[in-house]
Image (cartoon, rainbow, N blue to C red):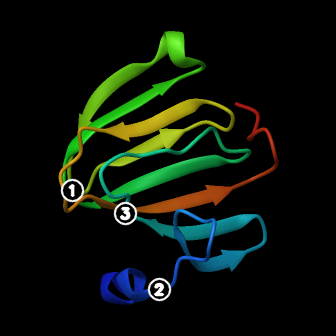
Amino acid sequence: MTLDEARAAPIPEGARSALLLRHGSMTLRYYAPEGHDPQTPHEQDEIYVVVAGHGTFALGRDEASLERRQFGPGDAIFAPAGWVHRFEDFSADFATWVLFWGPKGGEAA
């Protein structure tokens, strides 16, 4: 899957990202929100690999515990299943690969 193919992939109505690959419990998606990131916690663990752009990533068990860190192209970011997370103050060219895998609730440490 190339970046150009990912950018051209359709995003189904009601979805926020394009599904690119699926194998067992693993899915690979392409996510490029515009303006703000409205996502909510997911049922599976996930890794973001930033393709383009920069901004701030917020992550915590709940809204009160959010920690923020800067991100840029090439960065990999882990978000455990069920945790609150979102991209904030990101550039207009922001885009990321997203890998989901494992059981609902995430894998045991």
Q: Tell me the element at label 3.
A: loop
Residue type highlighted by circle 2:
Ala
80 or 55: nearer the viewer: 55
- Viewer-side residue, 76 vs 69: 69
Give the mark nearest the N terminus, 2 or 1: 2
Q: Nearer the viewer, mark 3 or mark 1?
A: 3
Circle 1 sits in a helix, a strand or a loop, which is it? loop
SS at badge 2: loop
Q: Indicate the quadrant containing the C terminus: top left, top right, bottom left or bottom right.
A: top right
**Image position, residue 68 (x, y; %):** 33, 24
Amino acid type, label 3 = Ala
Q: Name the residue under label 2.
A: 9
Q: Which residue is drawn at 60% across and 20% down?
A: 61
Disc number placed over residue 32 in the picture, else none? 3
Are the residues at dot 3 and dot 1 in contact (C-beta closer than 8 Å)?
A: no
Pick whichever of labels 3 and 1 is earlier in the sequence.
Answer: 3
Q: Is residue 45 above or below residue 83?
A: below
Q: Which residue is identified by label 1?
A: 73
Q: In the drawing, does residue 27 fall left or right of residue 31?
A: right
Give the quarter of the image for residue 67.
top left
